[in-house]
Image: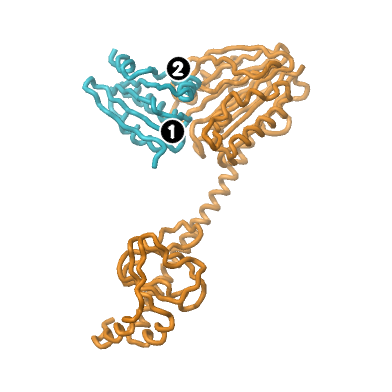
Chain colours: A cyan, B orange
Amino acid sequence: MGASSISHADQANGIRTIGLIGRLDMEGAEDIETTMEELTAGDNLRLVVDITRVSFLASAGIRVLINAARGLNQRGGRMALVLGENPQVRETLEFTGISMVIPSFDSGDQAESDLLG
Amino acid sequence: MALSQADLTRITAVLQPCPIHELAADAVLLEPGQMNDTIFLLLDGQASVRLPGNTGTAPIPVQSGESVGELSAFDQEPVSAEVRADTPCRFLAIGRERFWRELAPLPGVAEAMLRGLSSRLRNTNRIALEAQRRNLELAHLQKELGAARRLQESLLPLSGHLLPKGYPMRAATRMCSASAVSGDLFDLVPLGEQRIFVYIGDVTGHGLGAALFMARTVGLMRLLAHQIASPGELLAQLNERLCDSRSNGPYVTLLCGVLDGATGQFTYANAGHCPPLKLTRSGAEPLPLPKGVLLGAFPGVPYTEMATTLEPGEGLLLYTDGLTEAENPEGEAFGLERCCPLNPGAEPDQLLDSLLESWRSFTALDPPADDCALLALQRVS
C-alpha cells in the first residue's frame, strides 16, 4: 500500500503526460522515484507532469520534480507542471521558487500548448 | 533407514488411535509460554514456527512429515515459539505418555526423532548467531550515528552566548530533530559591532545524506558570510558552488539576511525557503518574499533582495517547514496562523518556549515527523 502512485500516457502530439497522485512526502516520493526516472530518461522529451491530485508536497517530492526537470533540460527536453486547487502544493512551489524554473499551468491544455509552442 | 513391513505395521497400530487436529489457515497451534504434552506430526498443509521477540528472523516453515511440540512435550518446559498454520493443516496428536511407552521402543522411531531434533538445534543455533551478529552491527551503527549527531549539533548555535556581549539585539534558537541527524541548519554570524548575518535552511530529504550536505552548506556559509555583504549575491555564489559536480540533489532551501542593530534595517534574500515572521506590537505576520529558487539545482539563477525595518522591541522569527507542516492526529497542519497568536513582545527565549509548547501539544508526536528549527531575533529597545 503506497502513499502515492504514478501513471503515464504518450499522446499523438509527441507529449508524454505523467500523473502523480497522493502524498509526496518521504515515503510517497520513494514509491514513485524509480518509475519517474525511467519515464523521464529519453532525449528531447516534452513532458507534462500533472500534480493536480497530489495532496501534500514535501521536500522529498520537490527533489523528485527537480531531478526530472534537470534531467530533461540536460537531454534537450522540457517539462511543464499542471497544478490543481491545493493551496499547500501551490504555496510550496511558490516558496521554493520552483514555479520560476519549471513553467506551471492550471490546465493540461495550457501546459501542452506551451510545450508545443 | 529402512523399516520392515512388520515394523511399519506396529508403528501404524500405535498411531491409529491418536486424534487428528484440524486447523484453519492462520490458526495458532502452540503459543509461547503455554504448557504442552503433545507431539504434533504435520500430515498435510503448510505451517510455520515463529520465534518470540524481535529477532528479525523469517518464520521457519514446517513441512508435512515434520513434527512440532516435541521439545516442550519432552522437557515439560513452556512452549518457546509460536506454531501457526499457514494453510489449512491436519496434525496427528501423539501424547507424551504414548510416545515414550509405545512408540519410542519401536525400531527407527527414536533415531528419526533424534535426527529431527539435531537438525532443528543446528538451525536454531544458526539463527541465533545471525541475530547476534545483526544486533552487534546495529549497536555499532547507532554509536556512529550518535557521534554524527553530536558533531552536527556542534555546528549549530544551540546554547551559550549566541551574540557577543553588548550587541543591540537578543537571539534564541531551538532544534527538534525527527531522527538522529537532521537536514536543518541555521547560524548567527556577527559582522562588526552591531550587524548580524543570520540564516536558516532546510536540506531536502532526511538521514545521513541530508546531514552531510547540511554540514557542507554550514561550512560554505561561514566562509561566504565574511566575504560577501549582499545576501542576494551571497546566495547566488552559494548556489554556484552547490550546483557543481552533483547530479541528483539533495538541494537546500535557505533564507538569509543582515540585521543592522543600530538602524533596525533587515536586508534579506531567499532561496526557496518559507517566509519569516515579523514580530511587531500588533502581531506576527509573514514578510514578503523576494524571488529565488532553492539552492543546488539550477545554476545561474538570480536572487533578489528585500528590506524591512525593525523598530526597537520588534523581532523576527525564522523557522523551517517542520514547524508549519506538522500535523495533528486529525491531519490538520499547524500552519502559520497558529504561530501568530504568540506574544510578539516576548523575549526570544520565552517566545520560542511558548511556541514549541503549543506546537508539541498540537502535534502530540514525539519525536516529530519532520525536523523543526527555530531562530528568533529581537532588536533591543
For residue B48, the mark is none
Q: Chain of mark 1?
A: A
Q: Is residue B327 above or below residue B141?
A: above
Residue that carries the numbered disc 2 in the rendered image: B300
CA gap, disc 2 and disc 1: 31 Å
Circles 2 and 1 on the same subunit: no
Height in image: B302 above or below B183? above
- Depth order, front residue of B362/B233: B362
Q: Measured from the top left, where is residue B201 in percent x and y? A: 56, 27
* Mark 2, secondary structure of its residue: loop
Foreground of the two, A13 or B121: A13
Viewer-nearest of discs 2 and 1 = 1
Q: Is residue B216 visible?
A: no
Q: Secondary structure at mark 1?
A: strand
- Which quadrant holds residue B226? top right
> Which quarter of the image is occupied by the N terminus of chain A?
top left
Relative horizontal placement of residue B349, taking residue B49 as reference (left or right): right
Rate crowding at label 2 as few (under 14), some (14 to 19) or many (20 or more) other CA atoms within 10 Å. few
Residue B337 location (% of width, % of height): 59, 23
